[in-house]
Image: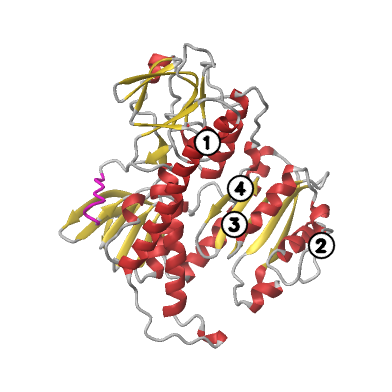
Amino acid sequence: MADKFDYDVVVIGAGPGGYVAAIRAAQLGLKTACVESRETLGGTCLNVGCIPSKALLHASELFHEASSGAMEKFGVKVKGAELDLDAMHAEKHKAVGELTGGIEFLFKKNKITWLKGHAAFTGPNSLEVDGKNVTAKDIVIATGSNVAPLPGVDVDNDGGIVVDSTGALNLPKVPNHLVVIGGGVIGLELGSVWGRLGANVTVVEYLDQILPGMDGGVRKEAAKIFKKQGFAMKMSTKVTGVHAKGKKAHVKVEPAKGGDSEVIEADAVLVCIGRRPNTQGLNLEAAGLKTNDRGQVEMDHRMQTSVPSIWAIGDVAPGLMLAHRAEDEGVAVAENIAGLTGIVNHDLIPGVVYTHPEIASVGKTEEELKEAGIEYKVGNFPFLANSRAKTNRDTDGFVKILADAKSDRVLGAHIISSLAGTMIAQIAQAMEFGTTSEDIAYTCHAHPTHSEAIKEAAMAVMGKPIHM
């Protein structure tokens, strides 16, 4: 380390990208510090995002199975199932505490200095952290993102009436009617939690379909499944106002293309229209940086910004706002700073919606292939024809594989299944090595498993599935 710097690397932010970058940098022998203003490490993901939401999704699914009679057909009769919401929240907090505490342990193990506070640039190699000057040879911006506001709508998480995703994780009681503004991943997941616990859920989406950006066939099938689960779906609908009155909220909506308005009364409203990068207060100008028109810090394929000593990863930089993308970039950026070769294939970042069934995808959608003028073949296989799914009475969904019409190379895959989030890893790894649909079709899959549907979909690309 050059004597004129306090650290080799300072990472701003201890979310999935930041804490991974710090750990990997320390493993590579670099003197490392990480700036984090929260009382616990892990960022949005571990504290108020991925982890607590998955804890509630799992718990709510258990309650739904026990209370809905879903298990009776298997000879399991449960009577008098009751919801203890406080206990459910307590278990969620316990999981969060264990994981955030685990990261603090890893920081100590790897001799990473935790600089508690907010960071602002004072130059390309220097920061002010709560009044203290800190210098580093390289600085990584990993400040993540926060909830995007809906203009004209005031969120009050403490009030529990009009909330964002953070507030929706901590509702003190199950609302009779929950309105979710936004038909994206987070809204559908949290809507599923409270729907399973007894809420009537209405999803209001400005576009004509839910899950923007996903494959069209998946979006249509997912909408059918959510409607079957009791969701009321108001597509092509614009929210023009939300007003809390006493213990109720009034949501004013109208057709996206104009028309008569109506008011929906709700016990709770979840505003969930997306996220925006956290760049406020960083004083990027002092380092010679500026954001693009979306508020992001631009970086190249090495995660390096226009200022050589400054790097950017995760939600604060252009790309998919996903924790695992940030983690991979965290490893890669540390390796690049250390003089190694860190690479992330941004074309093969899987995405998962953790509803029931789960929805997962990797690579291109049909719409993207059509727009690019690429000739392709499609293989579909429904779980209705999969023996394990049939036995489990878990037959919603399908596997869809898209392959190049000439080379047979797999270009994209899309799965709706209770195990989709786990299953997509097989295809992502295969695609990383340039797999063809024939490669997958002639790979032996264990029987009886949900994964056999992947094999059958690959065989369907070739025009010869066995079980349909």
Q: Quadrant of the N terminus?
A: top right
* Residue on which the image places disc 3: 421
CA separation in Å, label 2 and label 4: 23 Å
Q: Residue at x 33, y 59 (%)?
A: 179
Circle 2: is it few (<14), some (14-19), or many (20+) Cα within 10 Å?
few
- In the depicted structure, whether residue 111 falls above or below residue 245: above
* Residue on which the image places disc 1: 110
* Residue on which the image places disc 4: 350
Tell me which label, 3 or 2, sits earlier in the chain: 3
Which of the colour schemes (rainbow, by chain, secondary structure, one colour) is used?
A: secondary structure
CA separation in Å, label 2 and label 1: 41 Å
> Could you tell me residue 348's position as x and y percent?
65, 42
Question: At numbered mark 3, what does the secondary structure look like: helix, strand or loop?
Answer: helix
Q: Which residues are magenta?
A: 153-160
* Residue on which the image places disc 2: 444
Label 3 with label 4: CB-CB less than 8 Å = no
Q: Residue at x 39, y 46 (%)?
A: 273
Horizontal side, residue 413 vs residue 129: left or right: right
> Could you tell me residue 260's position as x and y percent?
30, 55
